Every structure is written in C-alpha cells, then in structure tokens.
Image: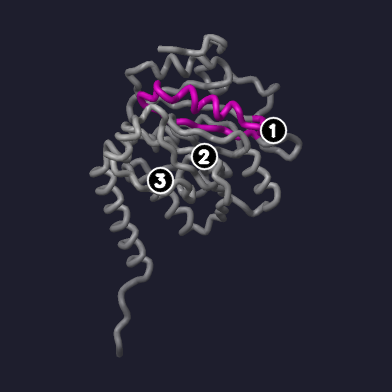
Amino acid sequence: MNVNSSRSAAPAEDPRGLDFHGASRQDLGSSRMTPLISCIVPVLNAERYLAETIDSILAQTYRPIEVLVVDGGSTDGTVEVIRSFGAPVMHLHNPENPAAASGRNLGLAAARGPFVAFLDGDDLWLPGKLAAQMARFEARPDLEVSLTHLENFWSPDVAPDDRWFRGDRRPTIVPGYSPVTVLARRDVFDRHGPWDVSQGYAANSEWFVRIRAMGVTIELLPDAFVRRRLHAANVSRVQASTIYDDHFRLVQSSLDRRRAMAGPPKGNG
C-alpha cells in the first residue's frame, strides 16, 4: 500500500488527546472563539480512496476542525491509511457494527465541537465547503442544519465502457440530501436523536424525514461543495435490493405514524 511518507506515523487513538490549548467543549463553542467543527468519517475497507477523502477535509479553509475516522472493522489497509496522518486524525474503532450510521453515532459520541459534519470514505469536499456553511450560520442564527448540492463523478479508475455497461444515468449535480453535505448544530442530535441504526440503509432518509417533522430549520446552498464518487463498490450498487427493502419499510412506517397522529377517521354523521 502506498502511503504518503510526509505524514506523521504516530496514530491519534484518543479523541481527547488533541490539544486545543486546553479548551473545553463549552469553550470551543463559546462566542469568544471560532466554533470547532467535528468532521466524522465512517469507513469500512476504504483503503483505496480514504487518503483523498481525509486530504479534502484537512484542505478546508475553515478552522478549527477535528477529524474522527470511525473504522467498522476493516480488513484491508484502512487502519494504516488513518494512522499515516498522525495527530490531525483520530482513529476510532467500531468493529461490532460496521454500518455507516453506527459509525456516525460513535463519532458523535466522541465529537467535541458544537458543530458536526460528515463525509464518507470515498467522497470529497471542496476546500470552501465548511467556510461557506459556517457563514450561513453566522448570517442566520436560527439555522440548524446546512446542506449543499453535490456533484456525482466517476472515479478515474473506472473505465468508460464500464460506466456505460452499468447504465448509470443519474444527474451530475443534485441537491445534497445526504449526510456527506450536512453541517449541523450538535444539539440537533441531542434534541432529536442520532441516526437510527435499526433503519438499515434507510437510516439517512429516516433522519431527514424525522428532523423535518420536528420543525428543524434546514437550508440548502445552491453550490456543489461535495463530490460523490461513483465506482464499482458503491453501497448503492452492491446492496441495491437491501436498500430498496429498507426504504420500503421506512415509507410504510412513516405512513403508519401519520395515520396514528391523525387519529381514527371521523364519521359522516
């Protein structure tokens, strides 16, 4: 495995091991300091693209940030990639549940910032993403969740004929109703709960449905600050049938909940 030799080899295993000049979580979120953003990356066997992903986080123009990579029990060289970055990147272990939603929740539990953001181990942020979103939070004190558009792109290691064979016709730039575009106030999760792991692959959709129902203030930026990589091992390809089943159950449970909230039908008399 090729790991950039310019990075420190010393791993940062403990989230509390980073030194922010002795600042507590309360201090980091106070008006006296620029708020810390905790960037959470759940991964499983992500060796191939993970270094690019982490580099795109560390290239953010906004500071301060902390990076928490949650490994769900990888068997490839993912751990070595994480450790190659040294102190700027914290390595958390989550071998009992490799699901991305579970990794995000573990990252939330360890995060110290009053703002949290998420990225998957094969996707990329453009350098100005967090700065642009934090500017919106400054302009709108009522804002609770900021989203951006995202750009789908074929990974350079996918041959053009393979792209055609797979028949993918999704739009290039789409509204980013996905965790990878989210920058949210930490207390949104404290008040409305974390990702619901029981929802399987529908956990992302369920979270958006839930916070909308709770009246959380959400804003979608018009710019595409996230690049979502398309490749042969995307979960949406490998687990397509399971994803369909999970989303069907989500729709059914949402309809049942609405009926329960509406109460029994009223008679005509």
Q: Report the residue at 35% width, 34% height from top.
A: 160
Residue type, numbered disc 1: Asp
| Residue with the most extreme front position | 161
Q: Quadrant of the N terminus?
A: top left
Label 3, secondary structure: give it.
helix
Q: Which residue is mark 3?
A: 204
Label 1, secondary structure: give it.
helix
Question: Residue 111 appears at what percent x and percent y?
Answer: 54, 31
Label 2, secondary structure: give it.
strand
Residue 230 drawn in magenta: no
Residue 50 drawn in magenta: yes
Residue type, numbered disc 3: Asn
Q: Which residue is mark 2?
A: 226
- The answer to which quarter of the image holds residue 23 is top right
Q: Is residue 177 above or below residue 78?
A: below
Q: Is residue 86 left or right of residue 1?
A: right
Q: Is residue 146 above or below residue 44?
A: below
The local crowd at label 3, few if under 14, some if 14 to 19, many if 20 or more residues have their Cα within 10 Å, is: many
Residue type, numbered disc 2: Val
Q: Which residue is mark 1?
A: 27
